[in-house]
Image (cartoon, grey):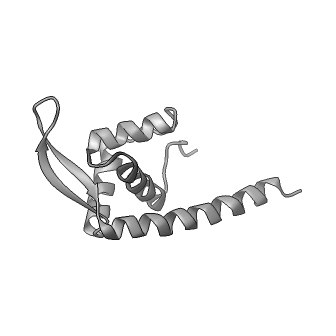
Amino acid sequence: MESKSDVLQGTLDLMILKTLDTIGAMHGWGIAQRIRQVSEDLLQLNQGTLYPALLRVEQKGWIRSEWKITENNRRAKYYSLTRDGKKRLVDETAEWERFAGFMSRLLEAE
């Protein structure tokens, strides 16, 4: 049986885009912590899941990255949303809402 924390690729992309839109520029660990916090510990993303997703989303041009110094005086790659990322977030949010509506109707059908 698959774990509840298994996330569809597009869904993780949407979580990353929404997190960066809400919070602003963050490093990968901060993004993972925010998603864990908002999900009330339902999702705990490991590095093997999150960092390939960040790379994929960056290659699509939806986010950009730059090296900065963290509050703990360490170098970390910070990610931020691009203009194309903001447009993608709007489109993906609408698509997710349509899909969630369908799933609700399906699960409530008698």
Residue 15 placement (x, y as % from top left): 44, 52
Compared to residue 92, the image places residue 77 above or below, namely above
Q: Which quarter shows the C terminus?
A: bottom right
Compared to residue 101, the image places residue 23 above or below, namely above
* Left-right relation of 104 to 8: right
Residue 85 placement (x, y as % from top left): 35, 65
Residue 87 placement (x, y as % from top left): 41, 70
Residue 63 placement (x, y as % from top left): 28, 61
Residue under the point 52% across and 33% down = 40
Comparing 83 with 41, the one in front is 83
The residue positioned farthest toward the right in the image shown? 110
Q: Which quarter shows the N terminus?
A: top right
Residue under the point 28% across and 69% down = 61
* Left-right relation of 46 to 93: left
How many numbered discs, if any? 0
Q: Quadrant of residue 32?
A: top left
Residue under the point 12% across and 49% down = 67
* Left-right relation of 51 to 95: left
Residue under the point 51% across and 38% down = 39
Comparing 75 with 94, the one in front is 94
